[in-house]
Image (tube, rainbow, N blue to C red):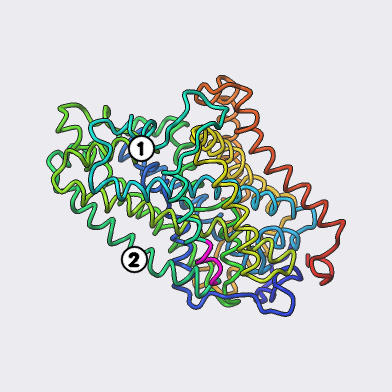
């Protein structure tokens, strides 16, 4: 298909509420802060440092940066371009690319719905731990306190017999804040919130890192984090880990960036925005790694063990290892408030972006105004979250759903998108022309090559590698019956939802009676 040099179209028929102009960001900085806020989430703080350490330390930064340049930023720019060109949430945007492709958009909406229900729960834990840090309520056994006293986790997955009010009430507070910000709109709510959240997060983490690197033993942790194991670069697993980290940390594959870009002005610089957001996210990840490993070095020194014996990731790092460190370090309460406060701020900006995808998709399809859409759709998401997760079985469901929706939702959706857009519809030249028409940095053939060849190959290999592990043994040793509904069922259900919604949508005709989809 020949490239076109005209500016992006004003929007397709399903891109705005009838009779109302589509909302817009107030400034480019507002959009960038929101995009960066969405990308910088819990995974940047508790996942990247451990992934880097386990995959070659300092040497991991090389495949990580290559993955960012060859896959992360190109896919980020692709999503920006789709959103800005078609001015709609994922279902409406993909519908305008090709009617059957609308299923991809609804699939992403379902993915965001699932993630929002449990992501908010982790924020509720972090909110409680800000308070716990002051009095170091976990005592001498942070592990027992987390899973026993606080979460009251059952011995095995599958049942819900105990309600946990200590999780329920902070979860209510999280949802009230998120829905209130979303109800205020793109400019007065999301943009203003991120103008507060992101500078606050930077200040929190700057103070935290400065404190961490001045601890006894910090150099031991930093040496473990940055010391390169160049032999690791010959391992395919390390490269898969690098690309996986980029996909999961940049908020690509969710539909978030398509949604956010749909509120951009028509002359917005897409390529520059993608570069800024991509490198800002990665810089924060490395910054977080410095803080985390300096702190782990202190812990290892205090216990007279190696860093490898205290290094962990995920919930174990945030809610077990760090409380133990806080109990042992000078000014531990202050450090704890900063750390868990950072988790809350980073998580809120990400959760807002996730729920916005669902809200925007419903608005586009039904013509519903923002406040009713937020209260109905966001309210439903909150109710599911509040009913399911503040229970003794909630942690198991969270763990299984998170694993399967990430591996076979986000990553698989990204693979389907690049194959559909580049191979099936052959839209990359058109989208490149749209991006180039308003961007200071023009895209070259390298952009199309990375999206059409490199990204599909890497994502495809990730799927094969992940499925091989999945079928060799059950995830975390969970019973097959539990994984069928809490893991596989969630991932497959999101895909089925996308197909069903598309069939219903096509049967009902274009949203709001506004004509056929623009191709």
Q: Residues within 10 Å of mark 1 (few under 14, many from 20)?
A: many
According to the image, label 1 marks what residue? Answer: 50
Q: Quadrant of residue 60?
A: top left
Q: Give the image location of residue 65, x and y in percent.
A: 41, 48
Q: Which residues are magenta?
A: 179-184
- Disc 2 marks which residue? 199
Does residue 309 appear anywhere in the picture?
Answer: yes
Quote the CA–CA distance across marks 1 and 2: 25 Å
Query: What percent of the width, then of the height, locates residue 360?
Result: 64, 63
Q: In the figure, is residue 507 to the left or right of 397?
A: right
Kind of element beneath mark 1:
helix
What residue is rendered at 37% in x and 51% in y?
Answer: 127
Q: Describe residue 329's horizontal placement relative to residue 182 as left or right.
A: left
Which residue shows up at 40% across the image and 45% down it? 125
Q: Which one is earlier in the sequence, the residue at label 1 or at label 2? A: 1
Q: Nearer the viewer, residue 352 or 11?
A: 352
- Which quarter of the image is occupied by the C terminus? bottom right
Q: Please, what secondary structure does the residue beneath circle 2 have?
A: helix
């Amino acid at each position: 298909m020949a490239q076109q040099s005209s500016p992006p179209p004003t929007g397709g028929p399903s891109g705005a509420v009838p009779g109302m102009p589509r909302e817009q960001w107030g400034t480019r900085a507002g959009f960038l802060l929101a995009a960066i806020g969405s990308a910088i989430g819990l995974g940047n703080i508790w996942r990247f440092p451990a992934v880097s350490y386990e995959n070659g330390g300092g040497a991991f930064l090389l495949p990580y940066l290559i993955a960012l340049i060859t896959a992360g930023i190109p896919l980020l720019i692709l999503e920006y371009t789709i959103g800005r060109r078609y001015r709609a949430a994922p279902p409406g945007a993909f519908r305008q690319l090709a009617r059957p492709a609308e299923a991809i958009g609804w699939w992403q909406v379902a993915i965001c719905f699932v993630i929002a229900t449990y992501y908010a729960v982790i924020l509720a834990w972090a909110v409680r731990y800000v308070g716990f840090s002051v009095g170091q309520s976990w005592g001498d056994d942070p592990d027992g306190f987390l899973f026993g006293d606080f979460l009251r986790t059952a011995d095995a997955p599958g049942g819900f017999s105990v309600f946990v009010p200590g999780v329920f009430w902070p979860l209510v507070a999280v949802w009230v804040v998120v829905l209130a910000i979303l109800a205020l709109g793109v400019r007065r709510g999301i943009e203003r919130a991120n103008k507060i959240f992101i500078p606050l997060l930077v200040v929190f983490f700057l103070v935290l890192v400065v404190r961490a690197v001045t601890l006894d033993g910090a150099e031991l942790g930093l040496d473990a984090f940055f010391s390169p194991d160049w032999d690791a670069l010959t391992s395919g697993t390390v490269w898969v880990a690098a690309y996986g980290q980029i996909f999961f940390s940049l908020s690509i594959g969710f539909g978030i960036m398509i949604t956010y870009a749909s509120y951009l002005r028509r002359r917005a610089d897409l390529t520059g925005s993608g570069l800024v957001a991509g490198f800002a996210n990665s810089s924060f990840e490395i910054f977080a790694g410095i803080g985390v490993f300096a702190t782990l070095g202190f812990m290892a020194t205090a216990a007279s063990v190696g860093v490898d014996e205290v290094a962990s990731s995920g919930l174990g790092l945030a809610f077990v290892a760090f409380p133990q460190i806080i109990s042992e370090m000078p000014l531990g309460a202050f450090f704890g408030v900063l750390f868990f406060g950072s988790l809350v701020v980073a998580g809120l900006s990400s959760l807002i972006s996730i729920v916005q995808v669902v809200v925007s998709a419903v608005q586009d399809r039904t013509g519903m105004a923002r406040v009713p859409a937020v209260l109905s759709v966001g309210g439903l998401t909150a109710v599911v979250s509040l009913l399911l997760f503040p229970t003794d079985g909630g942690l198991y469901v969270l763990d299984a759903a998170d694993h399967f929706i990430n591996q076979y939702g986000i990553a698989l959706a990204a693979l389907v998108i690049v194959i559909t857009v580049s191979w099936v519809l052959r839209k990359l030249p058109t989208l490149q022309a749209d991006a180039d028409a308003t961007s200071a940095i023009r895209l070259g053939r390298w952009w199309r090559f990375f999206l059409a060849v490199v990204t599909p190959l890497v994502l495809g290999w990730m799927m094969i590698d992940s499925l091989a592990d999945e079928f060799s043994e059950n995830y975390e040793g969970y019973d097959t019956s539990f994984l069928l509904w809490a893991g596989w069922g969630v991932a497959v259900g999101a895909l089925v939802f996308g197909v069903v919604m598309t069939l219903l949508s096509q049967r009902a005709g274009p949203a709001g009676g506004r004509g056929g989809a623009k191709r």
